[in-house]
Image (cartoon, coloured by chain):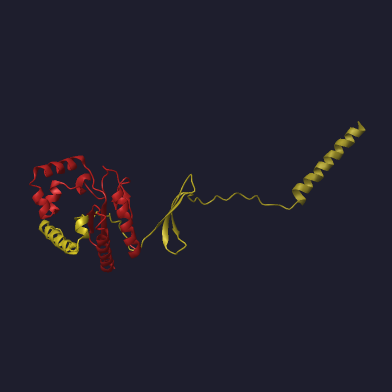
Amino acid sequence: MVFTAFYYATEAITKVMVWIAMKLLAPKRAFVKERRREERPSWGWFEARSPYGWSEMRWVGRATGLQLSIPQLPGMGEVVRASPGPPPVRLYFTFTEAASKDWFKEIEELARRAERKAKEKGEAS
Amino acid sequence: MEAHVLCPLCWALDKVVRRVCDELNVPYRVKYMATHSVAMQEDVSGFRTFSERWVREHGSEEQRKLLEDEEFKRVLRAVERGGYQAFPSLVIRWHDGYRTREIVVRGYDKEKADDFARNLAMLLYALKRFLR
């Protein structure tokens, strides 16, 4: 009985001392709250600067590590659609004609004829 | 050059043209085509064959005279209907800044290969000088 009371008393004293040591004597540390991070998109289009100096648009993939760079060309406001252009002019020869001495004369004559035809059709040659 | 894989004339012409182009440093490539393949930048596959229309528009006077022959006409129609292509056909293509220009040479003759090589070299050299 005596021993039990002694035991509980010792335990209480120890607890108080530990409490004093923990709460009062230990240096107080401020509770640091996690600061909310700035939300930055991890994928999509980014305006970046290439190692060569010019600015470019860069696509970063969402699931994959794809990085696609498209340079921003200066002075290019609108993307102009490529036109197929005028049809090619063809001159046809057989091998015998091409091996003859007068081949170049024939080429000149045919070219002249093709130009005349194009003018009749209204195309610029 | 538009060629066929099983065409000995194409192999022979390839040697001649390759030698000339290597000497003049002109880009040259062989395009192997099937008999019924559609040629590059063509609307109709049979356009490069000798057709009646081709002879009327581009042919020489001798070829136009041949059109009066019934048998010749029949052969031409058969070729046109089949859509057969003539091999080998050498296409010299360049761009003068406004439009593509082409010279098409068809066929091969062993005896006239040297003359042709000389003519081709002169033409390519002139084109290189002109386009520079």
Total count of labels: 0
Q: Is residue A85 visible?
A: no
What residue is rendered at 63% in x and 50% in y?
A32
Location of residue A92 in the rendering, given as x and y in whole percent from the top left corner: 19, 55
- In the displayed orientation, state which residue is furthest to the right: A2
- In the displayed orientation, state which residue is furthest to the top: A1
Residue B38 placement: quadrant: top left
Q: Is residue A123 left or right of residue B9?
A: left
Q: Nearer the viewer, residue A105 or B57?
A: A105
- In the displayed orientation, state which residue is furthest to the left: B68
Q: Is residue B22 left or right of residue B45?
A: right
Q: Is residue B71 visible?
A: yes
Location of residue A111 in the rendering, given as x and y in whole percent from the top left corner: 16, 61
Location of residue A23 in the rendering, given as x and y in whole percent from the top left corner: 75, 47
Report the quarter where the N terminus of chain A lies. top right
Tell which chain the image draws in yellow: A
Tell which chain the image draws in red: B
Q: Nearer the viewer, residue A22 or B118?
A: B118
Q: Nearer the viewer, residue B48 or B10?
A: B10
Residue B27 placement: quadrant: bottom left
What residue is rendered at 48% in x and 46% in y?
A64
Q: Nearer the viewer, residue B42 or B90?
A: B90
What residue is rendered at 59% in x and 49% in y?
A34
Report the quarter where the C terminus of chain A lies. bottom left
Location of residue B2 in the rendering, given as x and y in whole percent from the top left corner: 28, 50
What residue is rendered at 15% in x and 60% in y?
A110
Instruction: Answer above or below: position of B42 versus B113.
Output: above
